[in-house]
Amino acid sequence: MRVLLFILNFICFAGIGQHTSNFGRFSIAYPQGCAPVTIHISEHDNLGTISRQYFYEEGAIETTDTFHTYTEPGRYEVVQFLGEDIQPKTDTLIFEVLEAIPPALSIFQCSETEITVGFSDEYYDYYRVWFSETDSVTYVPGDGLPTYDYGQSNGMIQAVGYFNNAFASCPDISQSFNLQSLQPLNINSAEITEACLDDLYLQLSLWPSPDPLTLYSVELQTNGATFETIHQGKLTTSTPSFHLGTDLQIDEFCTRINIFNPCTETILFTQESCDSAGSTTKNLLESYATYSGDDILIHIDSSSSKEVEIKRKYGDGAFSLVATTQGDYTDDVPPGARPFQYRLIQQDSCGNAIDSIVVAPPHIKLTDRSYSENRIQISLSPPQNALGSYTQSLLFYNDDSSKVLETNFDTNILLPGGLGTSVHLRVRYSYDNDLFILSNALTEAYEITVFIPSGFTPNGDGLNDYLELFGLPTSDFDIIIYDRWGAPIHQSNTNPVWHGEIGKHDADEGTYLYRLTFRLENGELKTQVGTFTLLRN
């Protein structure tokens, strides 16, 4: 009767709420939200006043509370336990807590009173932008940029990022501004510099310093060809550098700096400079970036004896200075394991850039997860450096790194057993001279499942005569077998084998239910339920 009632409940309530558990017994409003975020459970069953307990995350205890606050990013399994012996006894849903990253708001000046805004990352699905307490707009990446005329030269903008079908718990950002008169930039010098593997850059020296709210475009003409745009956006330094490519033959070049009105999409000012190309000495060819724990180690080529500026960026953002060094540098990067790039700029004693290279560590990201198969799908951004050829492999290890497994690289990965309930994964790149470069780490839960055959035939023919548990992680277990009416007919916590007998009598043919409780090596107690068939012919 209880099983039938549960089925009716599932039919009636499955789908209620925006994010419903596997069997429809409970739901929360959304499947994800930014940390910190509080979920509230709505229960959808007609099982009366039986007790219901919830398990929210590792390290927490079961509780009757129907709300919980998550403070750390990650994927969490919310488990409901019923107080009576109703099959199945548990129901689950997955809730994802996302990193609370403030929106990367960019303000561009159109005139002394008008601005337009955009966002230099694609982290959020859409944004809400407030120009004042009463004027706001929703912006979806890809739509036309919103504009606003303040009627004065200063103001304040606030923006909040949102994910589709998620809690509105993500952080906002406020930015004040003071608009200046738009004015042209003068090109003091323009130089083509050579970095590693014939990688060319355009290095400019500008005056005055670029305005932080102005939209610029940089155009380049080489060897008398037509001008091509190599940058459009903000300029954050008076000595910007632009990557041109490899295997280029440049004898003469001209550079233009344009100032745009982004509201009208018109050019306001243009400055031009022409020169002949030069080259620099390569001193950073052996430099690279690799993960060291959760930090990123920047290795500076030992042949580089001069000071090196290290600049970092994420996505399409601008490079910003993080260190000046003559040796290796460890970057304590912000949490979230985002893909970072580093520009290394070698300087002479006068502070002039004489060599440059962009390096980046490999970065992996989880794209899909199958808990039933312990299988994951990853995407990979390979390392950036000039070290040449390499081989790839996967490293799996347990919490204390006492067990490490190495396999061939693949993006479709079956998590290995034997490493406990948490499996850590990195990609390793192997170069000549025993040099290894590591990616960031992914940590995934390993679902330990005991195999119980779907049927057996206790007829004395020596084949499949008993039901046996396979893969118990420890000897601490308890199994209860129920008949089709839910009455217990067999229980054992010492013998993982059942011969199909009830007392001294043979059990009837048919379908039986089981409830297995077993303890993992780390002391965690897990429960597994299912059915099997007993046949005698």
Image (spheres, rainbow, N blue to C red):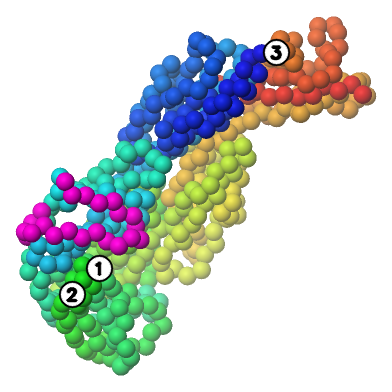
Q: Which mark is residue 259?
A: 2
Question: Which segment is the magenta one?
Answer: 134-155
- As drawn, 429 above or below 485: below
Residue tagged 1: 233
First in sequence: mark 3 vs mark 2: 2
137 within the magenta span: yes
- As drawn, 528 above or below 162: above
- Taking the image as shown, residue 505 lies to the left or right of residue 369, namely right
Instruction: Say which residue appears at 16% left-offset and 61% top-offset.
Output: 115
- Taking the image as shown, residue 347 lies to the left or right of residue 465, namely left
> On the image, which quarter does residue 348 sit in?
bottom left
Q: Mark 2 falls on what kind of element?
A: strand
291 within the magenta span: no
Q: Which amino acid does label 3 sit on?
A: Gly
- Taking the image as shown, residue 387 lies to the left or right of residue 346, namely right
Residue tagged 3: 486
Q: Can residue 517 be seen in this view?
A: no
Q: Mark 3 falls on what kind of element?
A: loop
x and y, in percent, of residue 283 in the image: 32, 73
- Categorize mark 1 by other alpha carbons within 10 Å: few (<14), some (14-19), many (20+): some
- Categorize mark 3 by other alpha carbons within 10 Å: few (<14), some (14-19), many (20+): some
x and y, in percent, of residue 144 in the image: 30, 62
